Image: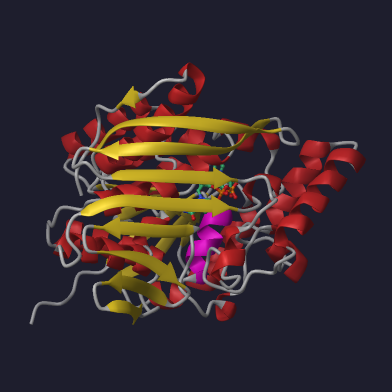
Amino acid sequence: MAEQRILGLGFIGVGQAVARIFQQYPDIEKLPYRFVAACDLRQHSLDRFENQFGGRTYRNALQLCLDPNVDVVYIATPPEMHKDHCLLAIANGKHVIVEKPMALSLSDCREMIEAADAQGVKLMAGHTHSFDAPIRKISEIVRSGDLGGVLMINSWNFNDFNARPWPTSELISTYGPLLNQGPHQIDIVRQIGGGVVRSLRGTTIWDESRQCIGGYSALLEFENGASASISYDARAYFDTAELYGWVGEGGALRDPETNLRSRKNLDSLLHASDDLEKALEEQKEHGRYGASEPTPEMLKLWGYTLAENVIHQPFFGITVVSCERGAIRQYSDGLIIYGAEGRTEIPLDRSMRGRAAELLELYKGIVNDEPIFHDGRWGQATLEVCFAILESAENHADVSMIYQVPV
Ligand SMILES: NC(=O)c1ccc[n+]([C@@H]2O[C@H](COP(=O)([O-])OP(=O)(O)OC[C@H]3O[C@@H](n4cnc5c(N)ncnc54)[C@H](O)[C@@H]3O)[C@@H](O)[C@H]2O)c1
């Protein structure tokens, strides 16, 4: 029997996002990947990587891209660097996973897609909550047609995203939650609704304390006639986890005081710090890979928990899907289907969490040459929806899409 090919994974940007990926290492370890390299400007994160995984470390992204042991480059630098790091990896023949938001403009997305096509490498628009088992299962049920066609999707998320100690420029560069959290929610509804959004009407709300967008709401119309209503309020007042048994984003129990704690922490920084940005940056560092061991308070501030406390399915707000002959929603350990015969619970396995599902999809794309569906074009289409919400909010008008791709 032919030996299974192992892919070498190298990370550019080993901060908060990658700390979350490494939390899922027990799932990822079972996959045919090895963590072989990391690049960052923060030496302490590279030291920790060497200790934990034994890979090569670099201070310069080009050098990681030249490393022959690296097959796939995972880009988790700040969004304004995604395009350049992506093009660098592609130019050196590497497959790429790029964190959300894929880039900060649609023209950057196009450049990245064209470069990957020209080099014949895979480009994946990386992790969003559409990779979570409950969302994958809802999509599978919808596509099976067992409940008839999909009619309407409702997705709500209310939390403390804006009140977390983001450096101000970082929060503003993504229009608050819109480009940072929007890709999760839009990927979820596009994956369930068939992918192709025809047009949308959107609004945004303002966050006085952060002086940027604090949330958004939009009605998306899909080409197949289905609709999706999405809302996100990141200002740390209501918390959707309250309607969900206090299960938090990662699948661990969320402290009901989280929103209040985040707002109080932010208020104290806004009013008491001589150097606000320095204080925010210090608190951001606490959640990054390689920082000194985070205290439980700091983990709570970022909405993070220790891996061993993850006991439920991940949760990205309430999502309810109406189909012709029934409805589906998530519960803490799986799905509930409301059909002609009543209510059925479908518990789901937790062994293949989002990050592992993402890597597996890419693996099959590279090794078996199967099409990946969270590819660059998919990521561009999701970003198009984010920008269309902004445009619609500004112009008080419907916006039509042009870059949409089906599931
Ligand atoms: N999918 C998710 O669940 C998720 C979670 C968190 C963050 N993210 C995404 O990950 C990306 C990074 O966000 P973050 O919160 O981890 O930021 P971060 O600031 O914590 O991490 C970025 C890292 O990049 C490093 N870096 C900066 N410039 C570099 C360069 N030129 N070369 C090499 N390294 C460099 C920084 O030192 C830092 O360690 C963003 O796009 C964000 O939206 C995704």
Image height of 52 relative to 79, above or below: below
For the point 25% across and 31% down, which residue is it?
403
Give the image's coloring scheme: secondary structure
Query: Which residue range is magenta in the image?
Result: 16-23
Q: Quadrant of residue 355?
A: bottom left
For the point 36% across and 31% down, which residue is it?
200
Q: Nearer the viewer, residue 43 or 383?
A: 383
Image height of 217 relative to 187, above or below: above
Kindly tell me whether residue 166 is visible in this rendering.
yes
For the point 37% across and 24% down, which residue is it?
398
Residue extending furthest toward the top: 395
Kindly tell me whether residue 126 is visible in this rendering.
no
Q: Give x and y (percent) for residue 287.
A: 66, 58
- Taking the magenta stretch, the answer to whether it contains residue 19 is yes
Q: Quadrant of residue 280?
A: top right
Image height of 4 relative to 379, above or below: below
State which quarter of the image contains the N terminus.
bottom left
The total of numbered circles placed on residues is 0
- Left or right for 70, reference 146: right
Q: Give x and y (percent) for residue 110.
A: 28, 29
Q: Give x and y (percent) for residue 99.
A: 43, 48
Dominant secondary structure (helix, strand or loop) of the stretch shown in magenta: helix
Q: Quadrant of residue 63?
A: top left
For the point 68% across and 60% down, which residue is it?
291
- Taking the magenta stretch, the answer to whether it contains residue 75 is no
Residue extending furthest toward the left: 1
Q: Nearer the viewer, residue 182 or 170?
A: 182
Q: Nearer the viewer, residue 62 or 400?
A: 400
Q: Give x and y (percent) for residue 254.
A: 64, 69
- Left or right for 17, reference 26: right
